[in-house]
Image: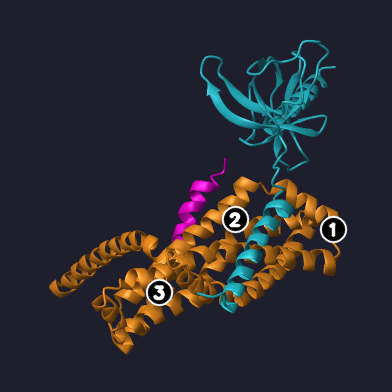
Chain colours: A orange, B cyan
Amino acid sequence: MGGVLRRLGAMVVNGVWQLGFAARFFWLILVYSGQSFTRLHLTIRELYFSGVLSLLIILVSGLFVGLVLGLQGYEILQRYGSTDAMGTMVALSLLRELGPVVAGLLFASRAGSAVTAEIGLMKVTEQLKAMDMMAVSPIARVVAPRFWGGVISMPLLAALFSAMGIFGGWLIGVVFIGVDDGAFWSQMQAAVDFRYDVLNGVFKSFVFGVAVALIAVFEGYDCVPTAEGVSRAITRTVVSSALAILALDFVMTSFMFRGL
Amino acid sequence: MSRTTLDLWVGVFVAIGIAALLFLALKVGSISGSGIQSPYTLSAHFDNIGGLKVRAPVKSAGVLVGRVEEIRYNNERFQAEVVFTVDGRYKFPVDTFANILTSGLLGEQYIGLDPGGEEKSLAPGEVIKKTQSAVVLEKLISQFMFDKAADSGSAPAK
């Protein structure tokens, strides 16, 4: 009994400790960002690795999600004779939820894990310490560019995911099934509000970008410098990013889309 | 520092990302929104607003002319007070009728404005005096039932 309590207490203390360290780490990233932006090519390089190389998976999965939404939406809407509303359904579900969330999950497992592995391995091979010895801040040189690369590419990837999904829904609805093209777009435009739906979706994906990028660089920086430690850190990145995305999504949705 | 192919790819990525955002804004979401220009506010009191929501459309002759801004309860009149904005291009006479209507059988509720015949127009901030509440299905059914009951009650007496 005492052992269980002790372990529980240690877990709680450890968790709070880590949270505090993560908060201080986030603050340090922001402080050193100015310094890292003076060498912009570092950030551009990370934009390439986490943004450009994630394009393929984001575009292809966006297309498939749109195709599935089109088929399922048609199946349900045709029962009520309102297949014209298909564009509305596809666009709203992608813009409000699926676009930011699924793109965020894919981004965490595609780019977040890679960032953790890279920083973790740098720690194992003591490259971070070596930089510190040479008075080069590892946060400015390694961490901040990876963080900003993730934060910048996430909203763009989510927008591409949504656009691709809408194209997929259009392909199924208009091209294959034969829903009226004009009704598809005009009903969509009537129902989708720029500020309420599009901007809220972009804001969501930006928040997910900050969360995923912070978790990825933190787990890499904080990992136990062994082979096992790095592999655990990567697992933790994917798991806690997914949890963070879904939990933040619930919180933001409850603020943004209260049934007015 | 020279330009590299990596920069090119990042440029392409950012460009198509912004293009996707523009597509979402213009083609999917019609950035002009409802196209309401220089709006002014009007308000109206209703006995019952039914399922009217904030941001619900305000229509006249079926055309969107404004949106509901605020719904609150007026404790002095024991009525709902609905504040809505109307496009500045459109003027309505002071004896305009505000009705709460439903689009389709299951559709959303909106405010329909029926213009009257007065020459004076409603000024910004003014209150529309002639209103008609939302139709409440239960009241409609009970009215029908009572009518029936009254009919069948009086019939055998003949």
The residue furthest front is: B1
Mark 3–mark 1 distance (CA, rounded to whole Å) = 43 Å
Q: Can residue A82 be seen in this view?
A: no
Q: Of the residues shown, which amino acid type is indicated by label 3?
A: Thr
Counting from the top left corner in percent of width and height, residue B4 is at 57, 77
Q: Residue at x 44, y 62 (%)?
A: A210
Picture quarter containing residue A239?
Answer: bottom left
Q: Is residue A109 visible?
A: yes
Q: Do labels 2 and 1 share a chain?
A: yes
Q: Mark 3 points at which residue?
A: A237
Numbered tag placed on residue B14 in the rendering: none
Element marked by disc 3: helix
Q: Which of A108 and B115 is in front in this view?
A: A108
Q: Earlier in the sequence, mark 2 or mark 1?
A: 2
Q: Mark 2 points at which residue?
A: A96
Mark 2–mark 1 distance (CA, rounded to whole Å) = 23 Å
Q: Nearer the viewer, residue A133 or B105?
A: A133
Q: Of the residues shown, which amino acid type is indicated by label 1?
A: Asp
Q: Nearer the viewer, residue B152 or A82?
A: A82
Q: Mark 1 points at which residue?
A: A181
Magenta-highlighted residues: A246-260
